[in-house]
Amino acid sequence: MRRTSAFLITLAAALLLLTGSASAQTPLPDLPLPKLGPAPDLQPVEGQSATPEVLRDCQDAGMPSAQVAGVDPRGVDSHAPNPLTGLRFFVDPTEPAFQSYSRFTRQGRKNDAQLMWKLAGQPRFRWFGRWTRPHFGEKVHNYLQCVAALQPGTVPLMTVMRHQGKQCNQKYTAGGAAEDARTRQWYDTFAKEVGSARVVIAFEPDSLGTLECLKPSRRISRLNVLRYGVNVLSQLPNATVYLEGGASDWEPAKRTARQLRYIGISKVRGFMLNTTHYDWTGDNIKHGLKISRLTGGKHFIISTAFNGRGPVHYKKWISRHPHIWRIINVWCHPLKRGLGPTPTTSTARPDKVDGYMWIGRPGYSGGSCNGGPLPVGTWWPERALMYSSFANNWLRPPSGTRAGLFGHPSLSSLGG
């Protein structure tokens, strides 16, 4: 059967919490109800149930097929209407954030439950990569069918991150030619399983910004592999694809645009920004408009998953005489950061910015720095609560703030 027992156990447990049982505790009345699948300022799809009364067989659920009449899902033409407008995005009740919310509710931890709901109740991207194993293809297929079973009429958000980035030095080969071949095969399998399903795909976060972490002779190889992947995914009839475009506090727009043109941005909707960074939405809009002008007017989305308080940047002096310094970006678990603008297609620049989306993964560990648990990718509920505690919809830092906070926070208090 095209499913895993572990997935079904988790799914059944999540649904049991939602639908109720003789032994389940009644949720606190003033907590938000776990209505699944909300898209900001949009009505539910006709006939959509918040949660099925019984666990349906994902095998028989079909594939996500939500469409908006007259709108091309691929949206390749720069003058095409926004393919995200009018969609209702999938909210996953099997992810750790939703489970933490349910657990806090059962335990009577009212404040923590309310905070966790800020994260759990929003549509976020599900990441697929080298860790999606064994039976990678079956897991992709099963996920899509369960989306259709749990929240009919919703569109799943999927991140593809297959490239390898374990080191950063002039000798690092990222697995060499053999790994390149495996990555190409992975793209083929992923595309086969997605098929004609209506999906939104975020393609290969950090793959361009870390290009110089590779051995010089391997850099063109990565671009060629990415180019292959773009060509494969661009042929999916109902997929809206955004390619990695870095962040406003990372690589120059001119360099990123050149790389995007090489890997085939002309074949897809556009690019994405700020997936793994914390920089302000306003700065990413400016940066994205520069890249857009250099890529034929391509549209883009901005990840606002954890940029509600912006980044933590500071100067590191190299020599005070003369004045030589560089900006340090605290990328690994900066403290007192918050969720940014909630996912929406109502943006400050609707002519080019298709949406603010939660592509990044708030609440997952990125390493052991600043108290993070290992291994990388471990669910870290305390950090998820931090993000919710400091959440806001700021696009730019308000006057009188430093690192997104009023007052004068010390660098150490920010994790620097």
Image: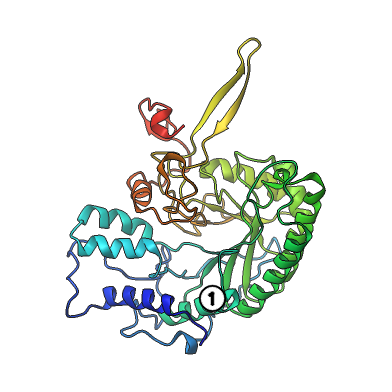
- Asked whether, in this view, residue 361 is left or right of residue 198, the answer is left
Q: Position of residue 349 (x, y in %)?
A: 56, 50
Residue at 46% of width from left, 31% of height from top? 416
Secondary element under disc 1, as helix, strand or loop, is helix
Residue 71 vs residue 371, the one in the foreground: 371
Q: How many marks?
A: 1
Q: Position of residue 324 (x, y in %)?
A: 64, 18
- Asked whether, in this view, residue 341 is left or right of residue 31, the answer is right
Residue at 67% of width from left, 43% of height from top? 168
Q: Give residue 316's quadrant in the image.
A: top right
Report crowding for label 1: few under 14, some 14 to 19, many 20 or more residues within 10 A (C-alpha): many
Q: Amino acid at mark 1?
A: Lys
- Asked whether, in this view, residue 190 is left or right of residue 403, the answer is right
Q: Position of residue 94 (x, y in %)?
A: 39, 70
- Asked whether, in this view, residue 252 is left or right of residue 307, the answer is right
Q: Would you place residue 280 above or below residue 187 in this image?
A: above
**Image coloring type:** rainbow
Residue at 55% of width from left, 24% of height from top? 315
| Residue 82 in view, yes or no | no
Residue at 72% of width from left, 43% of height from top? 212
The residue labelled by disc 1 is 139
Q: Give residue 29's quadrant in the image.
A: bottom left
Q: Residue furthest top?
A: 321
Q: Give residue 113's quadrant in the image.
A: bottom left
Residue 247 vs residue 342, the one in the foreground: 247
Q: Would you place residue 13 above or below residue 415 in this image?
A: below
| Residue 314 in view, yes or no | yes
